[in-house]
Amino acid sequence: MSSSGYSLRAHAIESLTVIKRPDVPWQVVLRNTTAVVLPLGIGLATGYPQIGLGVAAGALDTMFSDQPGPYRQRMRQLLLASLAAGMAALVGFLIGGHLLPILVATAACGFFGGLLVVFGTDTARVGMTSMILLVITASTPTSLGNALGGAALIFAGGLLLTVFSLAAWPLQRYWPERIALANVYAGLAVLARQQARDDTEVPALTEAMTTLQETLRGRHRAHGRAMEAFGVLLELAERIRLEFTAMSELHANPTIHAMFRDDAARVLAAIATALEQGDSPKQASRALATLSASEHALLDGGGNADGLAAHIHALAGQLAAAVRNADWAGSRGELRASEAETQLPTTLRSSSTWATLRANLTPRSVAFRHAVRMAICLSVALWTSRLLHLPHGYWLPMTAAIVLRPDFAATFNFGLLRVLGTVLGLVLTTVLLHVTPDEPWAHLALMAVLCMAFRYLATAHYGIAVAALTGTVVILLSFEGVNSGAAVSDRVINTALGCGMALLAYVVWPTWERGRARAALAVMLDAYASYLRALAQPDQRNAQREARGAARTARTNAQASIDRMRTEPATPPELLSLARALFANGNRLARTAMTMEALLDDLASLPAQADIERFVDHAADALQMIAAALREQRTMDSLPDLRAMQRTLASLLQGTEERATADLLVRVSDRLVDNIDTLAYVTHRSRQEPAATGQQA
């Protein structure tokens, strides 16, 4: 069996058997479930179940727009999802009985909804919500008055979910920001305890840093007095991470190193707890006092000889500042901190909405190809359901809208799990309804349990979540008079057809990741080159911070590209091997660059500053040449002789009084040359492989 076939089979087995740790907070599960169950319960109690059913359906369809983030961002996403659901429902109710108009509307909704993937997952959910509501309501066309009433109820369900999601805003104004910071400082504590070389060895920290950056510096960030403390804590987290990296490179006294890192981990963990709870960091202050005592004891015992002392002092100062700012970020500190806000770095700012859409209106765009596939697939699925007169036929286009994704791996994964989850839901719902009293309130309670399970497990195991969703929807429809047994069996048939159509649509006009992997890796190398170029200008700290953030994002995107390519059929093993080698060696270079940034203050005391900056700048030039050759699949231009430059630099630093710093710079610069030479070798070797490995199938 080919390696690609094995990878696809292995991915399928992994999707079925691996259950991730649920990451949805229980308060989110409860408020989302309440928004679905409460209106239906009130409708049953007051004798208006149809009204309750409409509001519950609106809440259920917009549920996944309730995502973590600043309250402003959450409000925007939920209002957009609610409005999209209401408008799509109105169109479906009005023209659902006319085949040609509804097919045109479905194609338009599929295209523009699919194109929203360019704005990220949260905005793409708005497009999916509109598609789902359009095809569902199109199955029950009605008059203008009834259409307006039904659409209003669905919109009201989204608004109810919004109210529940934002209810804590006045009481916990900065809760999302504190949680994002707490996750980062908890990750730093893990980094300290593990004595890992950098955050690439602690994946949760990398993800937490990216989330924190978007939360504090994003377009929808909060505005208020505590934002200054949050911004300072973000910068301190970056500096603390860099100090840990630099300390690891010193090869210092292992006993002193381990003891100090253990003390630092306790301080960081206490800061994380204080931020999460919104309390004053008293425990962190006590841990900091212990760390200060250890600092003096360790260094008095001879920890200065190997250059460790400077980094211990720097880290102790940064931890002290973090404890102070954590106090300001608490509930009482929010009233004391001075008003400020942090601007989004240039590298993370998005261009205007219309400019982004126009840039993606080309067949070369992944988003455009996905939008075209979605438009055709959704329309064909709706037409097929009408042509075959399938019972509950709207499940066919609805499933296609949910399963079809911009990449093959996600489409295959969602399709497989949705079919199996639906079958499991058939069995589960049949058993549960058999043992549950045949009373409306008993069914409502069962629906609440299944809805909670669906919301809680959706990110842990999609198949199990779909099983819970199957039961939720079937019971919800039973309040409208739909036979539960028929509803489940119809759902299985339509789900299988919808998944098959989604996979077929992707295979007919694919966007294989193997055609884009080189570009993603080249972007990563370019980002590393920009990071190095920023380090060649020691006084440009803002530029260094922006370049570091951009490099982290590019690395994450490259990793995601490799993961998608790994599960695609017919991926050339040579290309996958090249991608993994470039990514692994790129990570080595990133660690070297972060070590160099952590040493910038120390390097300022060395002679030959111009030579140091020139060497780093030439290293960035070489990296960009490698990226260009990789992207264009051509012979690499002649690279600068970095090895000769590094030896010259080492000679210039031999007579300096800062012996420890000079030796460390020589080691780091030697590693940098080795990293770049290895990347050049791997890229050059790939030129010997068949050209077809880099072409899009």
Image (cartoon, rainbow, N blue to C red):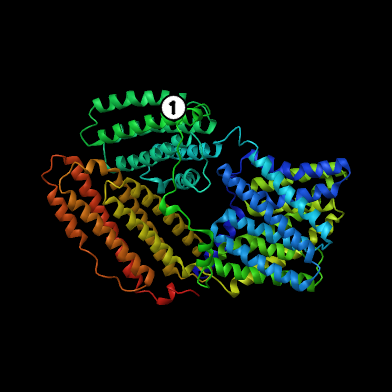
Percent x, y for residue 14?
Answer: 57, 56
Percent x, y for residue 317?
Answer: 33, 31
The correct choice, above or below, for 551 with respect to 682 in the image is: above
Percent x, y for residue 250?
Answer: 26, 41
Secondary structure, mark 1, is helix
Q: Outermost residue toward the left?
A: 655
Question: Taking 661 as reference, is 275 left or right?
Answer: right
| Residue that appears at 37% across and 50% down | 548
Question: Taking 614 as reference, is 343 left or right?
Answer: right
Percent x, y for residue 691?
Answer: 40, 76
- Residue ID for mark 1: 284
* Res. 314 visible in picture: yes
Q: Amino acid at mark 1?
A: Ala
Crowding at dot 1, Cα within 10 Å, few <14 / some 14-19 / many 20+, comes out as many
| Residue that appears at 76% across and 59% down | 90
Q: Outermost residue toward the bottom?
A: 691
